[in-house]
Image (spheres, helix red, strand yellow):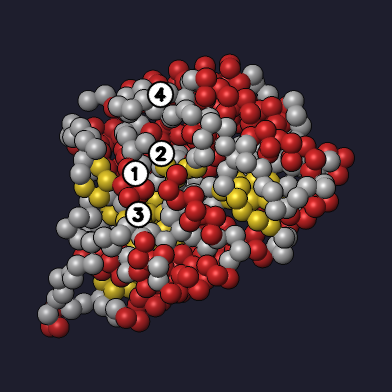
Amino acid sequence: MGIRKSSGAMRRRSFLKSTAAGAVGLALGGALPVRAPAQTRKQTVTIWSHFAGKNFETFQRYIAEFGQANPDVEVKATSYGALEILPKYLAAVAGGAPPDVFHAPGYVPPDLAFNKVIAPWDELVKVDPTTYKNFDPITVYDGRRYGIPVNGGLAVMLYNLELFEKAGLDPAKAPETWDDLIAAAQKMTNPAESQWGLVLGNQPGTATTQMYYTFLLSAGGELLTPDGKSIAFNSDAGLEALTFLADNVHKRKISPQKAYSEVQIYGEWGTRKFGATTLYPVWTGNILATKVRSATKLIPRKVKPATHLAGNYWTLSTASKNKEATAKFCQWWVQPAVSGRWAGETGAIPNSQAAADHPDFKKFLAQNPLGQTFLDAMPIARPFPGVVGVPAVIQIVSEMVEQAVVAGVPPKEAMAKAAARADAELKRAQKA
């Protein structure tokens, strides 16, 4: 897609200043040249990642493996939370000392490419030719690739089969529609025992908008207009999706009136008190570790089957002084033998068909009873629109969900306020 060029250094400084100050509120192979032996020196590549816990430990193991094969490059990774990594990164950019690689969680903010905060990879790294095209809308801007897919991620429904059976439901018959989901959740809900049929994330941030976007698409709606210049979630479908989420708490009472992040939900899955939630593949290991008998299925539909495509991406800081060494690491990563094994170990979706077909991934998939549904959902998975200003829209939509679901603001009122804010922010960001 075509994105208008930045109007200059002044615009870039303005972007960094305004976005860094409010980032929490707006968050979100070809062979490489080698030096002659006499010129070789060890280079250090810094990566800021939002991988945490077991996934970060696994990531560190992969870094060590790369280091053994490439003794001329040392990779140092630092872990930050998904909500704090963008504001910290923008502050580092403004201070002139960003990491070489910013690990974009969920999507690559188009504003970073538009404002030349990150640089294109095209001349540095060649992705596998079978890389899933689903990634292109959120990694390719103005014809150039700004994000290297680390792995894919999308939402499916996760069900507690133990509660299914306890409620007299057939574990072999998962809900196929929103009405089916509501009916099943009602049977699994027991507020007196803090047992809830459906628990969904609702805290401000990217993950909450990912969840809302999934139900918005299922209802036949869109986040933005086709040209990307106006918001479109303030529609009948958008209101229907928001009302569905709010009514689950305030009218049907199948969901708790409590602020929840998806990480908190997965952390409490082991209490055996939740009947259903949405799940992204990189969290399957956490779910399996709880020993709760669980299953994954496609998101129940309203108008059509749908889900949101997320994932993880390497982005290259324009200010990086180690682009060649950084590219060497990323080129190593996109090999199907590496990325396929990573996806298998973490439960993620491979970044290419070649990685998905690799024996190592297939071995892990055979051992993961929750994994196949994610691959089945890949053909219907859609990322956020890749347009400048979408980070602000994402944050505002998540705040809208929180207002309607947690605070109890009538959905129509919450949507009207969010729509006005989001449209203004979108136009401001896209103004030349």
Of the two numbered discs 3 and 1 in the rendering, the one whose residue sits closer to the viewer: 3
Determine whether, in the image, residue 253 is placed left or right of residue 203: right
Q: Which residue is mark 3?
A: 132
Q: Amino acid at mark 1?
A: Ile
Q: Which mark is residue 231?
A: 4
Confirm or deny contact between disc 2 and disc 1 (CB under 8 A): yes
Question: What is the spatial separation of the Cα atoms under label 3 and label 4, in whole angstroms?
Answer: 27 Å
Query: Element type at marker 3?
Result: loop
**In front here: 91 or 103?**
103
Question: What is the spatial separation of the Cα atoms under label 3 and label 2, in whole angstroms?
Answer: 16 Å
Residue ID at (40%, 24%): 231
Earlier in the chain: of badge 3 and badge 2, it is 3
Q: Is residue 171 above or below residue 418?
A: below
Query: Element type at marker 1?
Result: helix
Q: Is residue 338 visible?
A: no
Looking at the picture, how far across and down is residue 126, in whole percent? 23, 61
Q: Which residue is mark 1?
A: 138
Question: What is the spatial separation of the Cα atoms under label 4 and label 1, in whole angstroms?
Answer: 17 Å
Residue ID at (73%, 60%): 292
